[in-house]
Image (tube, grey):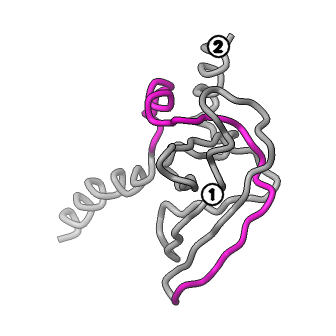
Amino acid sequence: MKNVLIFLLVLILPKMGMACSCSNIEVEDYLSSCDSLFIARLVKAEYKESDESGGEIKGKFGAPIEVFQGDPSKVKGLKIEHMIGSSCDQYPTIGSKYLVCGKNEKKYTSYSHCSYTVDHAEHYRRDILKQLRDKNL
């Protein structure tokens, strides 16, 4: 019985650790998925509870710091449907810079572990920024 338990743990734990892994996103994914792509600082964020399992966070970006493509003015802000206890939750930080991916059909961009809008300093996205800057030279 003990061996079966160990076998199951060895089988399941590595997959649980990768539940929110999104490191395979390429620069071409950004360029093809984002109508507007820019870096901006989050200047405001508010949380509104909807029920005991979560709520909504709405945020506003400041002026674009660096634009890679499209029109940043089409992005009204950040909107997150938040579920308490989700393993992939991301909490935006006022004052932090974000790589923002806007889509023309949506006024707000989403923010989650695997969304294209991310804190610009996330370790697996730094290479994306370098590649975007190289393409814009």
Q: Quadrant of the C terminus?
A: top right
Instruction: Please name the residue shown 51% across and 36% down the image.
Output: 34
Residue 111: where, in percent of width, then height?
56, 55
Instruction: Please name the residue shown 78% across and 47% down the image.
Output: 41
The alpha-carbon separation of the residues under discs 2 and 1 comes to 27 Å
User: Is residue 49 part of the magenta span, yes or no?
Assistant: yes
Circle 2: element type: helix
The residue tagged 1 is 78
Instruction: Please name the residue shown 41% across and 50% down the image.
Output: 18
Q: Quadrant of the N terminus?
A: bottom left
**Amino acid at dot 2:** Asp
Q: Which is nearer the eye, 51 or 88?
A: 51
Residue 127: where, in percent of width, then height?
60, 25
Residue 35: where, in percent of width, then height?
52, 35
In magenta, the rendered stretch is 22-51
* Residue furthest bottom as drawn: 52
Q: Which is nearer the eye, 67 or 23?
A: 67
The residue tagged 2 is 134
Instruction: Please name the residue shown 39% across and 54% down the image.
Output: 19
* Residue furthest top as drawn: 137
Circle 1: element type: strand
